[in-house]
Image: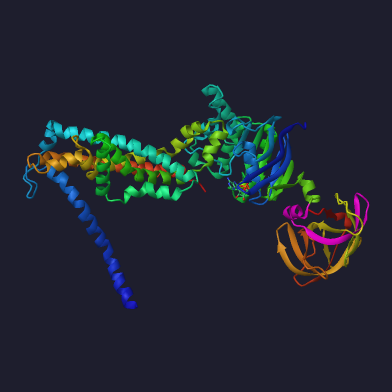
Amino acid sequence: MDHKIAVNIANVSKSFGSFRAVRNVNLQLKEGEFFSLLGPSGCGKSTLLRMIAGFEEPSEGTISIGGLPMAGIDANHRPTNMVFQSYAIFPHLNVEENIIFGLARSGLSRSEKRARAEDMLAKVGLEGLGRRSAHELSGGQRQRVALARALVLEPKVLLLDEPMSALDKKLREQMQMELRALQRSVGITFLMVTHDQHEAMTISDRCGVMFEGKLAQVATPHELYQKPNTKQVADFIGGMNFFDGSIKANGGTRLEVELPRFGQLSVDAHGVSDGIGAAVTIGLRPERVHIGSERPEGADVAVPARVIDRAFYGETIHYYLELEGRTDPLIASVTNFERADHFEIGDAVWSGFRGGAAVALPKK
Amino acid sequence: MNRVVAVLSRIGRLLPAYAVLYIGFLYLPILLLPLFSFNDSKILGFPLTGFTTKWYGSLAEQTALFDALKNSLIVAVVSAVVATSLGTLISRAITKHRFPLRRISQTLVMAPLVMPEIIIAISLLIVFLGIGIGTTLFTVILAHSLLTIPFCVSIMTSAFGQFDDALEEAAVDLGETSWGALRRVTLPVVSPGIISSLLISFTVSFDEFILAFFLSGNSPTLPVYIWSQVRFPAKLPNVIALGSLLILISILFLLVAERFRRRSERFTQQPE
Ligand SMILES: Nc1ncnc2c1ncn2[C@@H]1O[C@H](COP(=O)(O)OP(=O)(O)O)[C@@H](O)[C@H]1O
Ligand SMILES: [Mg+2]
């Protein structure tokens, strides 16, 4: 994949009255990548998307697409197309008429347009449904029509606003995989907005996490999960146990951290540059917490604990552990394989973890 | 306590009978019109003397009646078009935009619905005479537009209320200008509502009497003409025959309007 920039968002802010919905966002989308904007509802994701599409003007900053600044260019002249949250299928037109809607000014003949529509219908798996009227379509089919209608115009960037939110869980998972496959086959840059971290992690090349209008971190799903930049990101992307401690030594890439009552361990510094004695928070994913009836061998931290709650998720079980000297329960996630130990609420157990499993979290 | 419930439930059982009586009282007299129109007698009353279609046959000879019909059609068509156009624009503004005094302007637009027509008629008469444009079909058209706009606004706000604004944005996103989006998406999607609004306002204008009576001057509309003829027994059977035809046409119009209203609901509804 070449790394030409498809979209460049530079210092972009958007205010509605005195409310700042998007705050000083800097982001570059590479050509041909699948990028997800992830964040809780109301954090400004749609507003950012709508500024790229041309439905809102940035209050500050510039947006360029394919190297061209977009200021003053109306939505109908931008090389972007959008899949709306409601899909916005034109109800008075059939599937084919919906798909060729945007080709009206293309100068193509009627038969050329229909050929393109056929082509797109095949790509999105709706062969032979061109004559269907809009209100005979299921939710999944509506989404496919919305995709076909946008992609037939061959935009530089396809914008998708929560495209899965109207689908039920089973269909959503299927459409996620199909969407990913479609993006690979057309090679167009996709920018998807979602509040579902699982969805963003499954289908994106890279994700940006937004909170309250600010872009908190941009990274691959793997990086985002393993090395979240802040406590907020860590918490949003899957569960995370937090420990407060102080720095004993800072070796640049590794950090010696003293956790009161639990002892000293060496963790990934992850950009924390504070000196000796400074307070630091470290994060530990639940699946990196060991739980067993014997004291774990080779763990940097090993402490007795008591099971206070349990949640069954099918492929995993979460145990909530009470540790002496810790107010929040420590969450341990255990894969539910055949010979796994099972514990009951009230059981006395051993818990532990290695320093290599934990990561230092920079202060926000 | 139990007694009250018992009495209430007995009354409740009588409600269907009450409803039937009520509807009968309202509509049976209307059915008398077609009945008499086929009766072979100049006197409206029982007993019926024989079957005839001559009152329908001689309708064509009544030139004054046809002039009045023509006047009514002109007024109804023009005011339906004017009221529906204005009503559509007003409804789009009310449903799409937030602007200062939005609620108040909405109430103002609906006011003619609850104002006594006679008051409107007299006020308009004073104004029209005052500014010196006199009373013609044109003034009736103005008055009927004012009267029917509330009907159009309530039909069109309901049509736009279910309209997904993303449809317009989608059209623009796919390369249309905002004018093109209006022409290719918004208007077609709400077109059943527009047709229903045209039919309703046409019907309301067509049989409106008070405003037309005050404002039509020397060119009476059909209801005004009929009213003036009721005094002459010789013309009455023809009037009754025409009235029967109009009832039929009105019912057809309302049925068609209702069909379009339903279709507009289906168009704009979001599937789950
Ligand atoms: N046109 C607007 N006028 C005023 N406030 C708006 C407008 N659009 C969005 N907002 C506000 O901006 C914030 C972010 O909205 P949005 O971008 O839709 O969030 P998200 O898509 O992340 O859920 C919300 O608090 C919302 O109320
Ligand atoms: Mg949103």
Q: Position of B194 compared to A327: left or right?
A: left
Of residues B146 and A316, the one nearer the viewer is B146
Q: Residue at x 48, y 47 (%)?
A: B100
Q: Was residue B208 drawn as part of the magenta stretch in this picture?
A: no
Indicate the position of residue B54 as horizontal and vertical percent values: 10, 36
Figure check: A18 above or below A355: above
Q: Quadrant of the N terminus of chain B?
A: bottom left
Q: Was residue A250 drawn as part of the magenta stretch in this picture?
A: yes
Residue B255 appearing in the image: no
Indicate the position of residue A167 as horizontal and vertical percent values: 59, 48
Q: How many marks?
A: 0
Residue B50 picture quarter: top left
Indicate the position of residue B245 as horizontal and vertical percent values: 20, 39
Region in magenta: A230-256
Of residues A164 and A258, the one nearer the viewer is A258
Q: Residue at x 34, y 42 (%)?
A: B257
Indicate the position of residue B87 as horizontal and vertical percent values: 39, 41
Residue A337 picture quarter: bottom right
Q: Residue at x 38, y 48 (%)?
A: B108
Q: Position of A86 compared to A262: left or right?
A: left
Q: Position of B240 compared to A75: left or right?
A: left
